[in-house]
């Protein structure tokens, strides 16, 4: 009976021993084998940031600028006609009954900022006069005026202010006929008048 009990105790002891060894670290029963240590995983480095390259802003396209071309300057020519008024219309601004006055003296005067020019001419048999000054161009034509100066007739001596003949008439550009285009002439043509002299009021009308 005692031997049976001892055998049971021995079997129980063997089970305990086998249980203990089965649950231990398998490396513990090999004292000479070092326990492997897991190598630390390398730290993950963030991917390098690629700088964003921005293209420079394109300026708005502008057409190339060129200096303004200088305005062409032409020489000036001035024309007009002078009449002698009928004594019936003394003091009235009309050319009714008037006749062309030959030999009348007319003056062209230009008062520019840099220079002053003045010249005179006489009318032909048709009362026509023509100026072509060599120092006056279209750029300064607005500062020129034409005046009546004198008449060769004793009965028609008084200058009237018809169309500015006595006070000074400004130059007016003249549109030439198609047959003689202005671009083919060596000057720019201006016209004044028509002007008129009349008899003195105290003289009897004949």
Image (cartoon, helix red, strand yellow):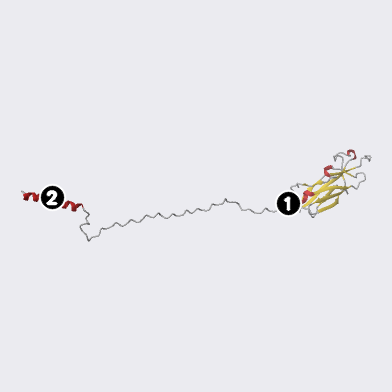
Circle 1 residues within 10 Å: few <14, some 14–19, many ≥20: few
Badge 2 marks a residue whose secondary structure is helix
> In front of the other: label 2 or label 1?
2
Q: How many marks?
A: 2
Q: Residue furthest bottom?
A: 32
Circle number at residue 41: none
Picture quarter with the C terminus: top right
Q: Is residue 97 above or below residue 185?
A: above
Which residue is found at the position 74% from the left and 50% from the top?
182
Instruction: Return the residue at label 2.
Output: 12
Say if residue 123 shows up in the picture. no
Q: Can residue 142 be seen by looking at this rendering? A: yes
Q: Residue at x 11, y 50 (%)?
A: 9
Residue that numbered label 1 is attached to: 183
| N-terminal label among 2 and 1 | 2
Instruction: Find numbered disc 1 in the image and state the secondary structure of the residue it sits on.
Output: helix
Q: CA distance from mark 2 to mark 1?
A: 139 Å
The residue lying toward the viewer, choosing from 116 and 14, is: 14
């Amino acid at each position: 009976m005692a031997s049976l009990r001892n055998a049971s105790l021995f079997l129980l002891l063997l089970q305990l021993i086998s249980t203990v060894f089965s649950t231990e670290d398998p490396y513990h029963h090999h004292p000479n084998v070092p326990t492997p240590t897991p190598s630390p995983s390398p730290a993950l480095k963030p991917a390098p940031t690629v700088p964003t390259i921005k293209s420079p802003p394109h300026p708005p396209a502008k057409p190339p600028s060129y200096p303004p071309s200088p305005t062409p300057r032409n020489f000036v020519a001035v024309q007009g006609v002078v009449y002698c008024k009928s004594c019936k219309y003394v003091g009235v601004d009309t050319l009714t009954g008037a006749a062309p006055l030959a030999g009348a003296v007319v003056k062209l005067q230009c008062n520019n900022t840099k220079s002053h020019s003045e010249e005179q001419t006489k009318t032909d048999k048709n009362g026509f006069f023509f100026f072509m000054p060599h120092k006056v161009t279209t750029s300064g034509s607005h500062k020129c005026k034409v005046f009546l100066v004198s008449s060769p007739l004793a009965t028609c001596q008084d200058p009237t202010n018809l169309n500015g003949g006595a006070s000074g008439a400004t130059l007016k550009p003249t549109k030439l006929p198609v047959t003689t285009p202005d671009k083919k002439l060596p000057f720019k043509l201006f016209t004044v008048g028509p002007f008129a002299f009349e008899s003195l009021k105290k003289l009897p009308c004949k």
